[in-house]
Amino acid sequence: MSDLEVQYLRLLEAVLFASAEPIAEKHLADRLPDDADLPALLAKLQGDYAERGVNVVKAGKSWAIRTAPDLASTLTAPKVVSRRLSRAAVETLAIIAYHQPVTRGEMEEIRGVGMSKGTLDVLLEEGWIRPRGRRQTPGRPTTWGTTDVFLDHFGLESLGDLPGVEDLKAAGLLDSGPAIDSYRGSPVAAVDAVDETEETGDGPPEPLDPGDGLEPDVSPG
Amino acid sequence: MSDLEVQYLRLLEAVLFASAEPIAEKHLADRLPDDADLPALLAKLQGDYAERGVNVVKAGKSWAIRTAPDLASTLTAPKVVSRRLSRAAVETLAIIAYHQPVTRGEMEEIRGVGMSKGTLDVLLEEGWIRPRGRRQTPGRPTTWGTTDVFLDHFGLESLGDLPGVEDLKAAGLLDSGPAIDSYRGSPVAAVDAVDETEETGDGPPEPLDPGDGLEPDVSPG
Amino acid sequence: MAIATDFEDTREATNTAPALSFVVDIDGYEGPIDVLLTLAREQKVDVTRISIVQLADQYLGFVTEARRANLELAADYLVMAAWLAYLKSRLLLPDLGSGEEPTGEEMAAALAFQLQRLEAMQDSGRRLMARTRLGREFFACGQPDPLIRATATELEVTLYDLLKGYADHKRRGTTGTLHIEPSTLYTVEDALLRLRQLVGKTPDWESLWRFLPEGLGGGMMTRSALASTFAASLEMVREGKLRLRQSAPFGPIYLSAAGGEAADEPRTEARAKDGDET
């Protein structure tokens, strides 16, 4: 193979890898220079990957890189469809993380709503929470806490790494306040304010300075 | 290589190919049988792909398969959807990357301005930063650092590959150093202590009282 | 003022009225240190070898210019100006050697360090952003295999989701009860105090706008100052200390001391369009 052909092969490989869906041959041809021999390149690439963990496969007139079929059994988990956790479940998980050990009743009290049956189950199944003991109150309810799997999933070294409420606020996640704050804090509002003064032509005239304001050579007294 | 090793290599290859995100070494280890020599397999795989159109790259303690950087000019993005970061966010990201672990107060000291809302928030949402623990100072503020996703995004193998990091270290610019905040009562320094000031941080400043000339905050000797 | 936005601010510098061309544009800066750094670069020398006295003069000139041009400066810009004025005096006057205070040289060194450090971080940020980046110059697998679990979990929840979830919960918790928080508005009391001090100084008719304090930062604060100053002026009219004049509905409002020598009509060259729309 010439250097040029090697370069075309690399490009083809990268295009197939990065594509979100199988690519039709004619589109592959568009992505390569005119002098590239697409059928030969595809055949070469298919050969290169034939014995590997992923294969170059043809479906109809389209091409893609796919996991080798024989690995499917070792790689496939029994029930694997990735899914998003419901908002209620995320919030419950957060409350357990921040308030542990915490009982189910306390979670409902903190959230102010009842909890559906499945919420704790999902978290438990995931291995993110575990029973921590029992509260010494009537009915001796189970208390819940998070696991090492939880820490691991979220990239935390310890529970102490969870940012406090003040840090959340500072990070902009806990952005609340009276309406007036959101009014003057928002860039849009600020633009409005400026626009108004612009309508007056020169903007507001220079205010009078009652005291001796800022003098460049003010000396400390 | 034994047949078994080849099989392990194919497994590893399939897992890396199948994921869009970098995968932590420990999770890779989970996917392989106990007798697999992960470092050797990763090194072999990295070598196999060194000259190809896709490469096996390391980002911190995580690994991923990425298209080769030299193909950048010929490989056009399907559609670039990445958002443009504000200047404040870029500066803050650099400070976190080079000074980690670092608290919000320290970031504000370096930039000389209070943190505006939506700065840390955006970096956190990108998955580029993570809480690293707490500083053992009053208020126990959260410290922040970068993630493997950050390294992966910028094509860095480790923090040691940050541009110019050695020079900056040698010049003492990554030390905490005597900042001028310690010599004056700056509004920035006060933010950590009194949280209420943060809420009004973006709002208009307090008007100067009439007749009250602007005095330096440092009492002269 | 630099307005907090998540992403690049593409708006025009709205402070600049078309009639005037300002030398200073405060919108582009990320705070006083950033202004200082820009000025230091303009000295066209290594940041390690800048003249702090010269820099202080330039900054004070910048602030004066900004005020002359009616740009609203945040408090921290003014605090920095005062500090630099003080630092300059410490550098120029002989050190009395009290021992307790940092010397002028120590303060100057701290400032130089902070400038260098910020410059280093700004440069590093730029270099970082200039790197080849995932999704722009190099790419990830375009079609991840859903049958292969990369991690031990199948749920797509990020740390951001978790923290956001807790923050959302907290926020809803806080809105459960209505607390009316003290708002930072310009009070009528403040306006009255200010107006009483100013009125003697204005023999002529002056626009109400001219009596507003500086550095309000626009928006609500300026509106409230306008309203409060107007209310305060009514109070002083009631006391017989002030005269008010408005020649047309929604027209500009003029103030004059009651015992002053001002003519009955405001000057015609007064800014006719000083709108008091609010």
Image (spheres, coloured by chain):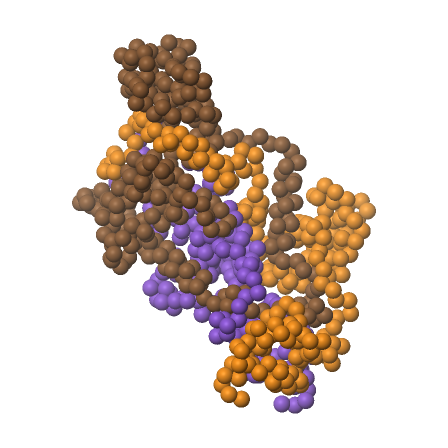
Chain colours: A orange, B purple, C brown
Determine which quarter of the picture holds residue B204: top left
Q: Is residue B96 visible?
A: yes
Q: Is residue C246 left or right of residue B12?
A: left
Residue C148 as seen in the image, left or right of residue C35 = right
The N terminus of chain B is located in which quarter?
A: bottom right
x then y, percent, for residue B141: 51, 51
**In this figure, what is the number of numbered marks?**
0
Residue sticking out furthest to the left = C94
Left or right: where B42 falls relative to C189: right
Relative to residue B43, is residue B218 drawn left or right?
A: left
For the C terminus of chain B, the quadrant is top left
Question: Which residue extends farthest bottom?
Answer: B2
**Residue in front for this viewpoint, A120 or C220:** C220
Residue at 35% over, 46% down: C32
**Hey, which quadrant is residue C19 in on the image?**
top left
> Where residue C129 appears, x then y in whole percent?
45, 61
Quick check: C24 above or below B50?
Answer: above
Identify the residue shown where x is 63% and y is 58%.
C158
- Residue B35, position as x, y percentages in the image: 67, 82
Q: In this view of the protein, can residue B32 be seen by the observer? A: no
- Residue drawn at x 47%, y 57% as measured from the top left: B93
Q: Is residue C18 placed above or below C191 in the rendered structure?
A: below
Location of residue A46 with respect to C73 vertically, above or below: below
Provide residue C73's location: percent of width, then percent of height. Answer: 37, 38
- Between C66 and A164, the one lying in front of the other is C66
**Relative to A73, is B146 above or below?**
above
The residue at 74%/49% (across/down) is A103
Foreground of the two, C140 or B135: C140
